Amino acid sequence: MPLTVHQNRAPTLVDFGWQMAYRLGFPMARVVWWLRQNDHEGALVALYVGQRLLLLRSSYRNAWNFPGGTVRHGETPEAAALRELAEEIGLPACQLRLAGTVCGRWDGRRDRVHLFELRLDELPMLRLDNREIIGAQLVAPNELPDMKLTGPVAAYLSTRV
């Protein structure tokens, strides 16, 4: 059974407003990306605590994802992964290991996603923003096949089996 990771604060009305903006904006962005045939570069972190993986629930997706996001212009994939760890879950800078790159067509655009791994003995207190990221859980490998996962996470896991 997945272990739910508790947040350090309850969502506020402002948080709910941001969640609604994400829920409305993301589908519109996907249409724009599809129409413009955008290419995207991202970075995700497979964060292991023992044998379990940390998965995040965003306010605008119904699939679980790793911490991560877009690689900004002039930013290295590792710098993007570290920035996203801090923004999404409040994790300070740490030593990441490059695990590879996956490519696919996800969210209406061609995507190249750099994957990093981080292994911890115990999970520090997470600081979810309650806006973009609204949930987190630690999941055992045998529970992953029953979960709805984003394309890049599924692609990463397929290389690990």
Image (tube, rainbow, N blue to C red):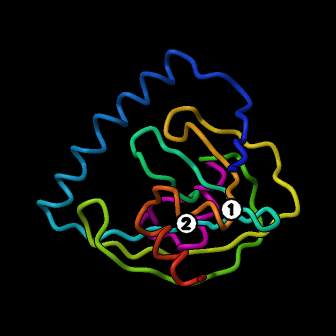
Q: In the rendered image, which residue does mark 1 sit on?
A: 53
Residue 21 quadrant: top left
**Disc 2 residue type (three-letter):** Leu
**Is 147 displayed left or right of 61 in the figure?**
right
Between circles 1 and 2, the one closer to the viewer is 1
Residue in view at x 45 percent, y 68 percent: 42
Query: Circle 2 — which element?
Result: strand
- Left/right placement of residue 1 relative to residue 78 reads right
When the figure is inspected, residue 130 is found, relative to residue 5, above or below; the finding is above
Q: Position of residue 101 (x, y in %)?
A: 49, 82
Q: Amino acid at mark 1?
A: Leu
Residue 75 lies in the magenta-colored region = yes
Q: Position of residue 119 (x, y in %)?
A: 78, 69
The span shown in magenta is 68-87
Judging depth in this view, the residue of 121 and 89 nearest the camera is 121
Residue furthest out toward the left: 35
Secondary structure of the residue carrying tag 1 is strand
Residue 28 location (% of width, % of height): 21, 44
